[in-house]
Amino acid sequence: SLSPRSISVKMAQRVTYRRRLSYKTKSNKVRLIKTPGGKLAYLHIKKTAVAPKCGDCGTKLPGIPALRPVEYARISKPKKSVTRAYGGSRCSHCVRTRIVRAFLIEEQKVVKRVIQAQKGRK
């Protein structure tokens, strides 16, 4: 039979967090990596960014990068918006429907005024 000395069991390496936060939270996600020296170490992972969405329909806004809030402060203003009315806040489809709706409401008001003017003449 096998004696305890003949079996060489390799113990798993202990790995500790590199930062002060010692709990397994959403902001403390890690990945195991092997360093060039052959040791195991934790690599802290950044949170994935969520793309900005249209305030009306909720679709992702094209032309605006998905970044973390701090990174938005670092990039220039043209990269955070689109050169259009409501650019960076609403998608093109929702802007179009808003403009058409406003135009039709104004047209309806004009039609009402014309009808009232015709009734006043009679």
Image: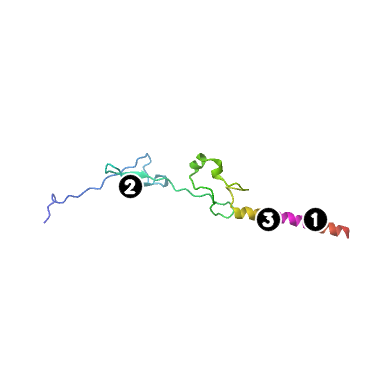
Q: Quadrant of the N terminus?
A: bottom left
> Does label 1 or label 3 sit earlier along the sequence?
3
Question: Which region shows up in magenta?
Answer: 100-111
Dominant secondary-structure state across the stretch colored magenta: helix
Which quadrant of the structure image shows residue 58?
Answer: bottom right
Q: Is residue 117 left or right of residue 95?
A: right
Q: Which residue is mark 2?
A: 32
Name the foreground residue: 3 vs 118: 118
The amino acid type, in three-letter code, at marker 1 is Arg
Rendering coords of residue 54 (x, y %): 57, 52
Look at 54% across and 44% down and name the residue there. 79
Q: Is residue 112 magenta?
A: no
Look at 57% across and 45% down and name the residue there. 81
Q: Quadrant of the C terminus?
A: bottom right
The amino acid type, in three-letter code, at marker 2 is Leu
Q: Which mark is residue 113?
A: 1
* Outermost residue, left side: 1
Name the foreground residue: 15 vs 95: 95
